[in-house]
Image (spheres, rainbow, N blue to C red):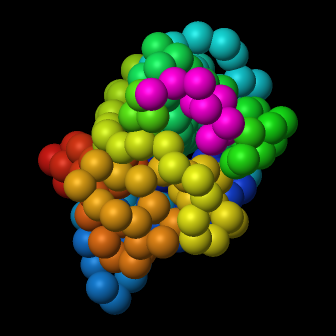
Amino acid sequence: MSSLETITFVTGNENKLKEVIAILSTSPQNENKIGKFTITNKSLHLDEIQGTIEEVTRHKALSAAKEIGGPVLVEDTCLGFTAYNDLPGPYIKWFVKSIGLVGLVKMLQGFEDKSANAICTFGYCEGPGKEVKIFQGRTEGEIVPSRGPTNFGWDSVFQPKGFSETYAEMDKKIKNTISHRFRALDKVRDYLLSQ
């Protein structure tokens, strides 16, 4: 198998890796397979720049491709509050780390509008110096007091529009057909299968 047929998904998050493989898999016999590609993973420490989600994702993909020396898939996930003009956005990870889930909910206490957008952006880069392809998915919802397991980012405070459960409370099979990550990965899968 040529190295171009192996794509390294850059993440150290086991939950994210499981979800990505569950959504992308096109082979029941080999769940790491997407068409002619095999997905492996590696945890890398990549510098995160400040900027738009597309700029952050593009930078991560180029840095990862240079470090890996081949095809990579990177992801950046955002949670944007409508009342805050789509902030915390790409900085959500640091907000969760700093103020926790209760703090996120409290940020909207003085606002009537609790709506939010979950945004997932994947960057695919064939190798060092190559163009980065961007794939984005978005799910509308609202911020609610934490319900369900709290072991996967901000899933327990995000309730997608049209549902009465938070991401954390949902059956994973249902979540994996409506989430922002699913919507972005659907585009990634279409692109990879067309190659």
Q: How many marks?
A: 0
- Residue 106's quadrant in the figure? top right
Horizontal and vertical percent position of residue 57:
52, 26
Residue at 48 percent across and 72 percent down: it is 169
Q: Is residue 39 above or below residue 186?
A: below
Relative to 38, 92 lies left or right: right
Q: Nearer the viewer, residue 117 or 45?
A: 117
- Residue 98's quadrant in the figure? top right
Residue at 74 percent across and 39 percent down: it is 103
- Residue 131's quadrant in the figure? top left
Residue at 71 percent across and 24 percent down: it is 48
Magenta highlight on residue 111: yes
Horizontal and vertical percent position of residue 17:
56, 63
> In this orientation, does residue 69 appear?
no
Q: Is residue 79 above or below residue 18?
A: above
In the current view of this chain or complex, which residue is farthest to the bottom? 29
Q: Nearer the viewer, residue 178 or 23?
A: 178
Relative to 27, 132 lies left or right: right
Magenta highlight on residue 194: no
Q: Which residues are magenta?
A: 104-112
Residue at 42 percent across and 28 percent down: it is 113
In the current view of this chain or complex, which residue is farthest to the right? 98
Q: Is residue 138 above or below residue 86?
A: below
Horizontal and vertical percent position of residue 72:
52, 42
In the current view of this chain or complex, which residue is farthest to the left? 194
Q: Quadrant of the N terminus?
A: bottom left
In the current view of this chain or complex, which residue is farthest to the top? 51
Q: Nearer the viewer, residue 158 or 180?
A: 158
Q: Is residue 165 above or below residue 4?
A: below
Horizontal and vertical percent position of residue 161:
28, 49
